[in-house]
Amino acid sequence: MMHSYLYLSIILFCLGIVGIVARRNVFTVFMSVELMLNAANLVFIAFSRMHESMEGHVLAMMVMAVAAAEAALALAVVILLHKHRSKLDTNVFSLLKG
Amino acid sequence: MEQSVNYLGLIPLFPLLGAVFIGLLHVFTCNRIKVAEKIYGLLACIGPVLSFVLALKVWVALRAMPEASRLLVYNAFTWFSVGDLHVNMGFLGDPLSCLMLLFVTFVGSLIHIYSIGYMGGDKSYGKFFAYMNLFLGCMIILVLGDGPVVMFIGWEGVGLCSYLLISYYNEDRENVLAGNKAFIVNRIGDLGFVLGMCFLFWGIGASGFDYLSLKANVHNLEPAIALTVCLLLFIGATGKSAQIPLYVWLPDAMAGPTPVSALIHAATMVTAGVYMVARFSFLYAGIEIAGNIIAWVGILTALLAAIFGMFQDDIKKILAYSTVSQLGYMFAGVGVAAYSAGIFHVFTHAFFKALLFLGAGSVIYALHHEQNIWKMGGLKAKMPKTYITMLIGSLALAGCPPFSGFFSKDEILYSALATGHFGIWAIGLLVAGMTAYYTFRMIFVVFHGEPRDVEAYEHAQESPAVMTVPLIILAVGALFAGFLNLPSIFGGDQIISHWLAPSLTEQHAPSSVGLEMFVIAASVIAFAIGIKIAYNRFAHGAAEPSFKGFASFAYHKFYVDELYDRVIVRPYKAIGAVIWNMIEPNVTDAPVKSVSKLYMLLGAAFKILQVGYVRVYAIYMVLGLSIMSLVLSQSLN
């Protein structure tokens, strides 16, 4: 039973990584980050149930709170990026190119 | 015993402060408002005149002290002390430095006053006087310094100022090159001076490096080192005082304004070498070989310069070679250990040479900067004051009794003969005749006969009083300065020799009336012959001669400048070119440049990784984290 939760979580996490690396739309990248966070949450909850303790729940709630704050900031950044370049393609933003 | 007086430090301070003040005034106003020339003139003369007044005070103070212990010292501060060596910024007033100081400040002040008139209308009037004051201040430091190190400050200072003033008309390339030449040739001499100081310190310096300690410990010096020190210091003197082989800068130094030439030739700079040898008389007196070398170099320089002087056609160059020639006499004097005779000639020379230069300046001023004597002539009627004063100066230079130059030159010749240097005396006598010839050649061509350039002659007029009054004062000096050291044969009591005696280590030549009479008679005959030849050739108008054979060779100064150019300057430049083109890029620059190339290569390699896309950086992060996780999980097992 426990294994299924972990496999699901790994699959979600890897999907998130693939989304960040492969997709070019800023929103998709952002959503992939959220997906990875939720994969982590799932692991927390699963282990919490297994050990029958509340620490995992507390951490999961924290991650969600942090994710909400992060979402607020990230969306603001996305709006600024859009104002600046009128595009949401991550390849446009390559000032650090050597 | 020695006495400490603090006004000794003020003497160099006045002209130096004047230089700073005038210089700043000039720098801050030259682009906006024009400060009146009178203000600059007044400011410039205050410093030298105050120094002269204080020099008189030093003289009075020294006279009041007992003869054997006439010493005034002032220690401004400790300049540096390293181990056992303590070098003070100290000043020493003894009879020798006091005599030098008196005429340096006196003649210097007169030249400053004269310059007010001569430089009138110049566009950097303030700059000129700032340099002049600095020049005089450096010379006073040179004279008053209480040891070789302090002397060296002044020694370098006058070198710098001569460079600044010789290339004063810096819009002309020739003048700048002349300034460079003076500076570089002087540097060669200065190297000798520095090395001499090093050897001296190595030999005896540990127990004090001022003149008094050196004099007290001179017996500790090994003879070989003493000889080395003497010769190295003399190399310094040949640079500063224009002797063979470093005399070449002085004639070129005529590029500067005429008052500068007067200052360089009469009061400052060129007398430094003679003064230095006299200052170190305690060292030179013990080493006869060094003295002989100095005397022979001196007398040969005198001969060479006199030959050149006979064929020049620029009035200032004639005077320049006459200075080189007279400096040769001075070195012959100090070389045969007649230090007081050498210094006495420096003293009288200061008066008549300043007089001649300022007189020549007056002529040049009247003729609107014409210096070729073959364009002058008949100026006697137009410029009587200049004529009479210059005639007095010329008689003094030529050694006509009873003008000042006669006594001083005669004392040197007598000392040479009395100490058995027959060759030096004979050449000296020959040079005396040549001196009379070229001096009066100049006087006859410039002032007698018919005017050669009628238009310039018509416009010529006597210079203003600010220029003629210094001439008259100097003429009085040139007339009577000789009587200050009247030899006993004329009933005098050799005031200057006695005055200088405590500062110098010298054995006076045995007095012999017969020998002295003979020397004087020979000198007078040489003078008469020289002047007679000049009179026959030039007194009644003479055309510009065209030189052939030896005369042409002498007119081109034996091609010494060209020889130096071939033998020293060009090979030196060639070595420089080799170093610049071969050694510098391949040996010294190569490692430095390859280090920077290495980093550029590394940078180019790592540049590939920096693509600039966020997602690529994310991949790096994921990869990094994965590797870290793997390593961690391995280590846990």
Image (tube, grey):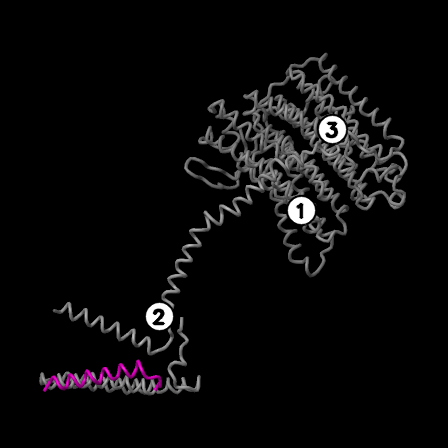
Residue B479 in sight: no
Image position of B341 (left or right of B360): left
Q: Nearer the viewer, residue B25 or B604?
A: B604
* Residue at mark 2: B609
- Residue B628 drawn above or below residue B333: below
- Magenta includes B490? no
Circle number at residue B176: 1
Report the chain holding disc 3. Answer: B
Residue B321 x/y as whole percent: 72, 33
For image coordinates 89% across by 34% down, the residue present is B449
What amino acid does circle 2 point to?
Leu
What amino acid does circle 3 point to?
Ile
Range drawn in magenta:
A1-26
Q: Nearer the viewer, residue B333 or B52?
A: B333
* Of the image marks 2 and 3, the number of the one nearer the N terminus: 3
Which is the main secondary structure of the residues drawn in magenta? helix
Q: CA distance from mark 2 to mark 1?
A: 58 Å
- Residue A49 drawn above or below residue B187: below
**Dot 1 lies on which element?**
helix
- Residue B233 drawn above or below residue A74: above
Q: CA distance from mark 2 to mark 3?
A: 81 Å
Residue B218 x/y as whole percent: 50, 25
Q: Nearer the viewer, mark 2 or mark 1?
A: 2
Residue B162 x/y as whole percent: 65, 42
Using a 10 Å C-alpha cutoff, classify the residue at mark 1 as few (fewer than 14 neighbours), some (14 to 19) or many (20 or more). Answer: many
* Residue at mark 3: B307
Are discs 2 and 1 located on one and the same chain?
Answer: yes
